[in-house]
Image (spheres, grey):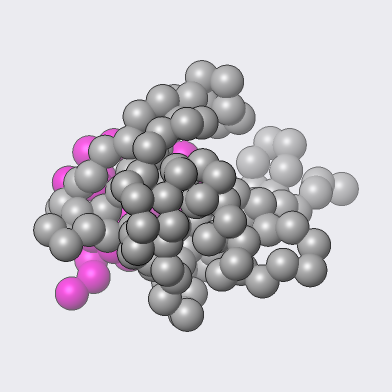
Amino acid sequence: MKKTVKVVAAIIENDRQEILCALRSPEMSIPNRWEFPGGKVEANEDIYSALEREISEELDCRVETFKDVFNDNTHEYDTFIINLISIKCRVVEGSPEASEHSKLIWLKRENLDSLKWSPADIPAVEQLIHEK
């Protein structure tokens, strides 16, 4: 039986309507693919606090989350199942710095599909591209 991992991902938009995209490093699982930054939800942690904690750890900045789920997708990889919950947020303190990722870039919605995304993130990417 595969383990299901619950993960939160941040869709961070700046004031130029660009979205933050993070490149997974060669050391990470699913390496060299793009994703929305975030991480695992710990036991007894709500998804919003989990996301704020992960972004603070990973990107060294503080975000404020919007209190609704933008996209909720379950994707089966070879060795595990990921339940990826994407939540929109904005930076309220500091600016994102890559510590675990190889690279961070800001992209307009219409250019998001130019990147090679990790499979679990694709539904959220498509939803963003088609968002009005």
Q: Which residue: 74% across, 58% down?
A: 42
The quarter in which the C terminus is drawn is bottom left
Left or right for 125, reference 28: left
Q: Which sits in the foreground, 65 or 74?
A: 65
Q: Which residues are magenta?
A: 111-132
Q: Which sits in the foreground, 24 or 13?
A: 13
Q: Position of residue 23 (x, y in %)?
A: 40, 33
Left or right for 101, reference 2: left
Q: Which residue: 38% across, 37% down?
A: 97
Q: Position of residue 131 (x, y in %)?
A: 23, 70
Q: Which residue: 41% across, 34% down?
A: 98
Q: Position of residue 33 (x, y in %)?
A: 43, 32
Q: Quadrant of residue 91?
A: bottom left
Q: Position of residue 69 (x, y in %)?
A: 48, 74
Q: Main secondary structure of the magenta part?
A: helix
Up-down relation of residue 24 to residue 36 (above or below): above
Up-down relation of residue 46 to residue 23 (above or below): below
Left or right for 61, reference 4: left
